[in-house]
Amino acid sequence: MNTIATAAITAATATEPTPAKTKYRWPDSLAWWFALPASFLMLTTLILPVVIVALLSFTNYELGMPDTAFVGIDNYLSVLSDPKFWHVLRNTLLYTLFVVPGSVIGGLLLAVLVQSVGKGRRLYQCLFFLPVTATLVAMATVWKYLLHGQIGPVNQLLHSLGFTPIEFFGDPGMVLFSLAVIGVWQLAGFNMVLFIAGLVAIPQDLYDAASVDGADRPLDRFFTVTLPLLGPTMLFVIVTSSLTAFKVFDTVAVLTRGGPQGASEVILYQIYLEGFQYLRTGSAAAMTVLFLACILVLSWLQTRITERKVHYL
Amino acid sequence: MNTLNPAPADRLLSRPALYTLLRHAILLALAFVMLFPFYWMIVTSFRPAQEVFSGTFNWLPRQFTGWDNFRTALNDAPLLLYMFNGAVVCLGVLLVQLATAIPCGWALARYRFRGERVLFGLVLLGLCIPIQVPAIPLFLGLAITDLLNTYFALMVPFFLSVFAIFLFRQSFKTFPEDIVQAARLDGLSEKAILWTIVVPASKPAIAAFAVFSVTSHWNDLYWPLIVITNAELMTPPLGLASFADPESGANFGALMASATIVTLPLMVLFLFIQRHFIQGVTNTGVK
């Protein structure tokens, strides 16, 4: 659900209302009192922990161990020279590479179709959004059954069509793709809502103009008007989806625990194991910092896109 | 051009009507695919175990087990307790978030003060930082102070919502200044103006945030997995994850029943207030 937050924010910055001349200078202390509780929480539960995790990444700290020493960049060197790290990074990127096109194209398809009907628009929107609100852990167990190697209905369907059953979660070559199917299923409805907001903003006269120019078949209209004008929304949705996909954890933790043979080990699951199961704080902290760096790059891209969108529309 | 070329009169349906029908057909097919997991979850929760393992496909249970699977699910794991814990955590988190973010958002929206830019900059930065980043120090802090396995541990990383501050700042910015001025002339304190005039008028923004907050914390697995080992304090996702694994193959009927029980409250909530929910994304979303 973090996606929703990111989406809302980045977008809201774009639609910043023109600042009214309503800001008054009161004694600073008044505003400070208003901001104090939040600032206190920000300092203790966000800023300090982030600073500490960065510091920890340069130490050999372990919970309960008496001796802690600075080890320089040793943690980073060992993380970066460990094939495991590149393996989980590769898996995470591969998963992202499956989920992003699937959920973006799926969301766009749903949005265009839903917007094209008059009656039932709201109902469809509601139905397609349902997976977004569902408890992913619970739905993961449902997917485990749906894609079960022997008794899952998907394999029963494949069997009745004459295909050999597929071990969706048991086959190392298949597992990331199977997890991505769940990811797409959950994200498509969310992307749909973002696309619909973009579609609504396209002025009708552009369609009229296109129609005068001879583009009035639905597909023509889509490629000459809809798609180009959705460009900024599209970029935004792609980055938001990448952020979500990059943070995949729940389905891995519940369904595969990184298996089979490490084929579904992803970065957050690895950080979780290092930091909270094996309690190797130093290397977990170093991985966290690297993870944050990836996230910040994506977020920076998102901001840039939002800025561009302001000029565009 | 097509429009200049009217459909032959002997056709049963005009071209636009045919397109509309086609669109609905595609939409219904997609809805079927998207909702099939929910359908299968509910149907399976009413199937006997031997039918689940029979390996034949049936749309409906051939033998209807009534509430047996639900009873098993509730006996196997204290699902109701998990849900109670989930509710406590969601409510506690939401209350603190609102109590701290509303005044902060108001100050950022309406007052000029020293440190304003720094504070807002930190809010924007905070928006990019997922919970997994401060997780290690927060965990260590809780471990050292012996606070693991408490409600407090479950809630504390989420008390501060930079998202809420940001959202409320945006929403408060557009609150009419005339009303604020009139209230000031009436002698109301700044605090009273915020809580008795501005907040009641900002219900849509607050409701939209409340829905996001409750959904994300009800569904969260990462943080409870780290700080809770005591079964009495588990939240629904953690409880489900912890007992789904060992006996995974054993009883899909009961598993689907538990999934139904856990998913249902949010689904019902969503269906009731879906307008708020989707509008929340749309309004604050890309425009």
Image (cartoon, coloured by chain):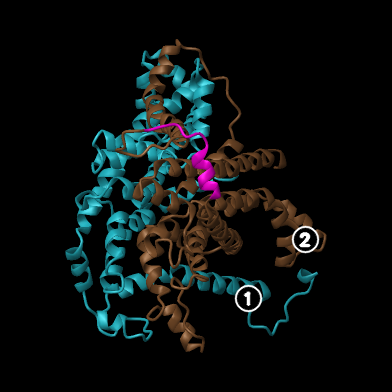
Q: Quadrant of the C terminus of chain A?
A: top right
Give coordinates of residue B284: x percent, y percent: 52, 42
Chain letter, brown in picture: A
Q: Mark 1: which secondary structure?
A: helix
Outermost residue on the right side: it is: A213
Determine which residue is flagged by label 2: A211
Bounds of the magenta segment = A68-81
Quadrant assignment, res A167: bottom left
The colour with which the image depicts chain B is: cyan
Residue found 41% across the figure and 36% down from its top: B161
Is residue B87 part of the magenta span, yes or no?
no
Determine which residue is flagged by label 1: B18
Along the viewing direction, whichever of A108 and A62 lies nearer the viewer = A62
Name which residue type carries label 2.
Answer: Ser
What label does residue B80 carry, if any?
none
Give coordinates of residue A278: x percent, y percent: 36, 49
